[in-house]
Image: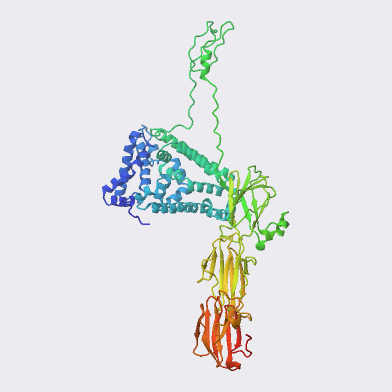
Amino acid sequence: MEPVPVEGRPSDAELIARVRSGDLEAYGELFARHHHAAERMARQLVPANDADDLAGDAFAKVLDALRAGGGPDVSFRAYLLTTVRRVHVDRIRSGRKVTATDDIAAYEREPESFDDPTVTGFESGAAAKAFASLPERWQAVLWHTEVEGEKPAAIAPLLGLTANGVSALAYRAREGLRQAYLQQHLADVAGDRCRWTTERLGAYVRGGLTKRENRNVREHLDDCAKCTAVYLELVEVNSALPALLAPALLGTAGLGYLAAASGAKVGLVGFFVTGWKKATENSTRTAVGAGAVVVVAVAAIMAALALTGNDSPPAAISNPPSQQPTQQPPPNPPTVNPPSVKPPSTQPKPSPTESTQPPQPTPTEPAPTTAPTSQPTTPTPTPTPRPTKPVPTTPILDEGLLTISAPRGGGSVPIGWGSIAWAPALEASAAAGDQWLISIKVPANNTKPVNIGIKYGAALRWPLSGDPAGWKCVRAADGKSGTCTATNPRAPQAMPVTFASPTGGSAADRTFTVSATSGRLYDDDSATIEAPPRMDENLLKISVRKPDPDVHLRTLTVAPGDRSSVTLKITYGASLEWPIAANPAGWKCSRANQTCTATNPARPAPLAADFAIPDGGSASARTYQVVATAGLLNDTDQETLRGIQFDESLLRINLPDPGHDPNPFLYNRFLALSGATGRPVTLELSWGKHLSLVSANDPGWTCSRSTDIRRATCTTTNYKTRLNTEWAAWPGSGTANQLTVTATTPGRHDTDTVQIPPATPPHR
């Protein structure tokens, strides 16, 4: 990642390059950025009034290194703070007293090096080697983010990146440090099992392993002290970088520097407590390895408190103390007046430096008045109360605490349930839904309460009909969760649960989550109930709304249920047309897609489907099909509709009544239809050569003659009244004087014939 100028400010790397090329103004910018940090470090080593001089000398040293082509390329802050410490050590060396001696051979050796025990211990460890192997940009971003605790926005100008770029670089640097640390340990791993575990410790700390791998790593750590130590140190690398990196570069003063940066020494005590918690919270089985981590933390804290609590440099550098301090004799008792009776002369007078018994007074003399005053010199020490070890409260994830056993295919009892007493009952009720088994594994002799919480999606229901054996359960009022408590926390019984097979919903709606807790241990797991699409013969019903000879009136009904959507797909043959009216209540339909979607999937409204009676066509051309999909359920129904039928009662050709003949000089014939009111009607008329159609123009009817002079068609879209036709006729009989009429409605047809004039005159 190349540095990107941020708001026009050059990065530390750019300023360093300019200094090496002779630009002293660039060094002034570096001074302004890092001077406060250098002074803060200097105050941990020298009195406050000398801190500015020490910081200034360190800046001069760094400038000389940069001009000579050395020094840092990116990580200016860490290099500068290290230089402050080294300049301070050089000052102490140069200020040592001159010792007169006649044995010069004892001093004819290489100059001794200044060894900081904290740094020596750290630099010999895998964590320091891993940090040293990182690229300098990674070291720089780790220093500023993890040690200094600066925000990405504040670090961005120093590295020439955006704030997001700093965050991304820090993430890669932390992951690189973990991987480099593990590589340092892999070289010393002998056994295959230890190598397998060590290769996965990085992912184990981050929680990136599968449950099986987690269990295998945890079991190995229980038995292998060496891998446990690696794991504990990796936890520190992962979560306590300031406490590791600061001593590596700055010595024991680094912890004081961190405390000064945070503004209070209590941060060091917090570091100790955090170290203890980090070491113990991961598992109760790692307490032995945790002791080593805490001892190191205590030593670092004591050294840091010594540095941050003194304004003068440690005298041990120029005048080391002896291994065992000499015990001082008790102070001389106060002088008291001797009793009036002198002791015998033969008794020697005690020397002031000798410890002698005080003279015994005679019984006649009162007790010396100085006795009470001499007693306070040796008071009985009050025992100092030992601090009680804090009780850990941080929750610990135990991947082996909770296990959910999945059912076998076909809705049968889950694997491993065969030996359980209630397994046959579950087998008998397998058709009721999906069976699952919740198992809890607690530490031996556990006394902590064992609780289970069950949450489930919208497509599921509470999976218990009562209290399972060994458990007390309560269903929550929200209808989406519940809790159970084991009656025997030492050995919780396995809990069988049965979820009714869902009829719809997304994967989230069909997922349930189980959370288990016991003291500090916790674990959670979830499972999604697989519900493949299936046929339900009771989902869709097609019914006849009411009988009608001229139209097929149908109602499509979908059964109610718990699902997120209901869709009907309607397909039909060539002789049929789209049967749904515009904007039906409770549905949104698309004629182009031939689909309808319910606006209320839980209780879809009945949908009217009206098919015009097909005018001929094959059976497939007169067939329609409806496919209903409701969540995971589906159903398909179809029907073949009848075509137009012959109806003998449809058409009647009536003669006028003798007293109501509209035109006695012509033959009037009335064409009447039965059961066709309001329907469209078509009349086809044809007649013989002795007949002539004079008139057919009643209101509501439209008639037209074809090119054939003896054929006509009369239609009405809304039949209300009969059609009156007037005919002129020449005498004759047979087909020459015959009128034929064919009536057609949407679902029926009928044909009648009549003679004009009739062969037998009507009776008048």
458 lies above or below 46: below
Q: Position of residue 428 (x, y in %)?
A: 72, 59
Q: Position of residue 641 (x, y in %)?
A: 61, 76
Which residue is more in the foreground, 141 or 135? Answer: 141
Viewed as shown, does residue 353 lie left or right of 288?
left
649 lies above or below 73: below
Query: Could you say which quadrant of the image residue 675 lies in?
Result: bottom right
Which residue is more in the foreground, 430 or 743? Answer: 743
Viewed as shown, does residue 718 lie left or right of 38?
right
Q: Quadrant of the N terminus?
A: bottom left
Which residue, as the protein is rendered here, is positioned at the far bottom? 732
Residue 194 is at least partly visible in this image: yes
Which residue is more in the foreground, 525 or 156? Answer: 525
Which residue is more in the foreground, 228 or 121? Answer: 228
Q: Quadrant of the C terminus?
A: bottom right
Residue 412 is at least partly visible in this image: no
760 lies above or below 554: below
Q: Position of residue 629 (x, y in %)?
A: 58, 66
